Amino acid sequence: MEFRNLTGRREIGANCYVLGSGDARLVLDCGMHPKEVGFDALPDFGPLPHDSAQGIVITHAHHDHIGGLPVLMRRQTQAPIYMTEITGELTSAMLHNSVNVMTSQRTEKGIAEYPLFTHRELEENRARFVYHDLKRPFGVPGTPWELSFYDAGHILGSAGVMVREGNHRLFYTGDVHFEAQTICMAADFPREGVDVLVMETTRGTHQRPADYSRRAEKERLAALIRDTYEAHGAVLIPVFALGKTQEVVLMLHELRQEGLIPDMPLHMGGLGTKITTLYDEYADRSRRSYPGLRLLEDIPSLVKPSRAPRRGAPRHIPLEPRHIYCLSSGMMTEGTLSNQFAWKLIENPRHAVAFVGYTDPDSPGFALRNAKAGQKLKLAPDLPAVEVNARIASFDLSAHSSREHLAAYAEALRPKKIILVHGDEAAQAWFQERWAQTLAGVSEIIIPSGHQPIELW
Ligand SMILES: [Zn+2]
Ligand SMILES: [Zn+2]
């Protein structure tokens, strides 16, 4: 069996990997690079001839794992798409949104090849989605492989996948969190019998303080919200539409119930609302905390989204004191609700912005969270620069495992080979260094460069 990285570069982007054995091919994930545009944002499908794959596995519905899927499906016309049911439904919603984003980018940025796929194509694609529950092994017709999903604890529906060929086993983590979040429970991954581990390394460069606790971070966030309430200000929390929005909304509900924050109307926006509807649909049918709890119905402080004035038009959300705004995008990308809202409120020292997730160094969110008080900041080309006077704070509530947990998982598993993916060079170097001590003579550590086939067994 062989492994190939079609991502083409090391940092997190268009995640896409291929397993090959004889004539059989299995594709793992098919993302789009968030910082590239057009065809350049896709994985390099070069080493994967048309109609050579018998199956495609999707671990979860984040853009860097599904963004290129419709293009891949056009080239691999027979391959079923294997995933959990929730991931399938979330994938559809996210890709339909992609069509809308690409369509507006076509006019705004003049990207001629956009959209790379259409709404109609996405509807047709659903016929090829094949859903499997966690821990229920299934075969891939025409291949020697048996697959099985394991809850990855990252977002709802996320899964790692075991690929079994005879007596050999490969396990691909996808994105994983080994600790419980608010809705997602801790990952439930295999603890033995893995020969090859393909592992994400997102947080390899992040050192957690020794006294870190998620509870303490939540209490620090509560304190910021209380202070802002006292000052008659508003709180903006920029969030990814899928995963982080739902986690934060339920976390705020918990804090409210514990009496740690006052009763403040809570807003979510745009795609976040659509995705939350799907989280609620699966409230009883997924491995999660608070089973049965429906965010949109059961959280009294959540402001019911009003209807958009016309189809496709952005809904207007007024800025009011003593309200909380959980708006996408998490990185405050130009043109998004969180970007526009930040522009409206950062000049006023009564307001606060709370960052709760990853921001790319090139994003407006990164610039804001690192801005000095009083500094002038331009958040988008079409918006005038504004002075940063609001309180800006960051909280470690990541949906990815700490590097210590990832390293410890591999050390307990002791696979013969470990392939490091989904992280930048410095992140992967940290794991190599640690395992040079702890897994010396046990595991071969491999960093797959673009397209080089790696012999697994
Ligand atoms: Zn993810
Ligand atoms: Zn990812």
Image (cartoon, grey):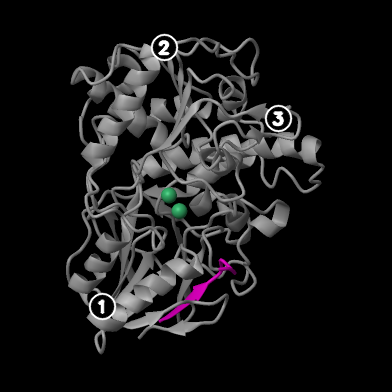
Q: Position of residue 17 (x, y in %)?
A: 49, 67
Q: Which mark is residue 322?
A: 2
Q: Residue 456 lies in magenta, yes or no?
A: no
Q: Position of residue 257 (x, y in %)?
A: 20, 18
Q: Residue 2 lies in magenta, yes or no?
A: yes
Q: Could you tell me which secondary element the residue under label 1 belongs to?
A: loop
Image quadrant holding the N terminus, namely bottom left
Q: Could you tell me which secondary element the residue under label 2 belongs to?
A: loop
Image quadrant holding the C terminus, namely bottom left
Label 2, residues with CA under 10 Å away: few <14, some 14-19, many ≥20: many
The residue that appears at 26% across and 86% down in the rendered structure is 440
Image vertical order of residue 224 relative to residue 206, above or below: above
Mark 2 against mark 3, which lies toward the viewer?
A: 3
Image vertical order of residue 372 relative to residue 419, above or below: above
- Which residue carries the number 3 mark? 385
**Gap between marks 1 and 2 measured at Cα:** 52 Å
**Gap between marks 2 and 3 measured at Cα:** 25 Å
